[in-house]
Image (spheres, rainbow, N blue to C red):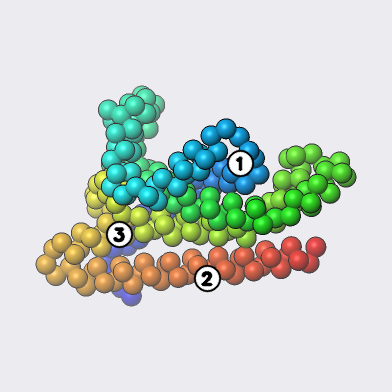
Amino acid sequence: MILRPEEWAALALSLKVSFWAVVLSLPLALLVAWLLARRQFWGKSLLNALVFLPLILPPVVTGYILLLMFGRAGIFGEFLARFGIVLAFRWTGAALAAAIMGFPLMVRAIRLAIEAADPKLEAAAATLGAGPAARFIFVTLPLIAPGILAGAVLGFAKAMGEFGATITFVANIPGQTQTLPSAIYAFLQVPGGEASALRLVGLSLFVALGAVLISEWLARRVAERIGQR
């Protein structure tokens, strides 16, 4: 498949945005999933609702809220701008929007894995003198590794396909904020752009399918290694 320079640029930016969206949101997703699965506290239902709110709201609404909060005149945007950090109409803002949209999927996958892990194994480790941190790192984390991988892949796939929140928050600037979905949309708006749009659609399918297959392979390898212990 031969791609034009602008098509390669959209692919490279999408991969970059998706990678950082997962890297930055995965630790928080793990923490929130653990709290929801293992702890009882006041406001748990509210936290659960807030986590899944981006899946319920129209993506454009999420993007507009991000623009109000992190735009140059926003509450957080004005503060960050003092340190030279600008998110609106930048690829970093696209990564933030993609991370927020994929966050619920990551939390869901990791939470299911934590709930499926046998708490008795952690209790057994505690009786042997392992502290909370040691139990989590050496017992819980290996058990839930397939769920973490699944969550990361879901977040990556969601980030690759995110359109509404991204285009609202960072616009559609070629070479700067134009991801694959934005490029496909742009090509469909001009005469003769169908061929480029079709190439990018095929490329999106290839990347998404590859990510899922790699995730399944990694999950099996992790499960095999856990079973051998």
Is residue 166 visible in the rendered image? The answer is no
Residue 229 horizontal side relative to residue 37, left or right? right
- For this rendering, which residue is in front, 61 or 26? 61
The answer for how far apart the CA atoms under marks 1 and 3 are is 34 Å
Residue 2 disc label: none
Q: Amino acid at mark 1?
A: Leu
Q: Quadrant of the C terminus?
A: bottom right
Q: Nearer the viewer, mark 2 or mark 1?
A: 1
Q: From the image, tell me which residue sits under label 2.
A: 213
For the point 29% across and 51% down, the residue is 164
Q: Residue furthest right?
A: 128
The disc labelled 3 sits on which kind of residue?
Pro
Q: Does any portion of residue 154 appear in the rendered image?
A: yes
- Is disc 1 surrounded by few (<14), some (14 to 19) or many (20+) residues within 10 Å? some
Q: Which comes before the other along the chain, label 1 or label 3? A: 1
The answer to whether 228 appears left or right of 113 in the picture is right
Mark 2 crowd level (few <14, some 14–19, many ≥20, 10 Å Cα)? few
Q: Position of residue 137 (x, y in %)?
A: 72, 47
Q: How dense is the environment of label 3, judged by Cα within 10 Å: few (below 14), some, or many (20 and up)? A: many
| First reached walking from the N terminus: tag 2 or tag 1 | 1
Q: Residue at x 44, y 60 (%)?
A: 157
Q: Position of residue 154 (x, y in %)?
A: 48, 59
Name the N-terminal-most of marks 2 and 3: 3
Residue 37: percent from left, percent from top: 62, 47
Residue at the spot x=78%, y=67% of the render?
228
Residue located beneath label 3 in the image: 181
* 210 in relation to 94, above or below: below
Check if mark 2's residue and mark 3's residue have beta carbons within 8 Å. no
Q: Quadrant of the N terminus?
A: bottom left
- Identify which amino acid the numbered label 2 is placed on: Leu
Q: Which residue is mark 1?
A: 35
Callout 1 touching callout 3 (CB < 8 Å): no
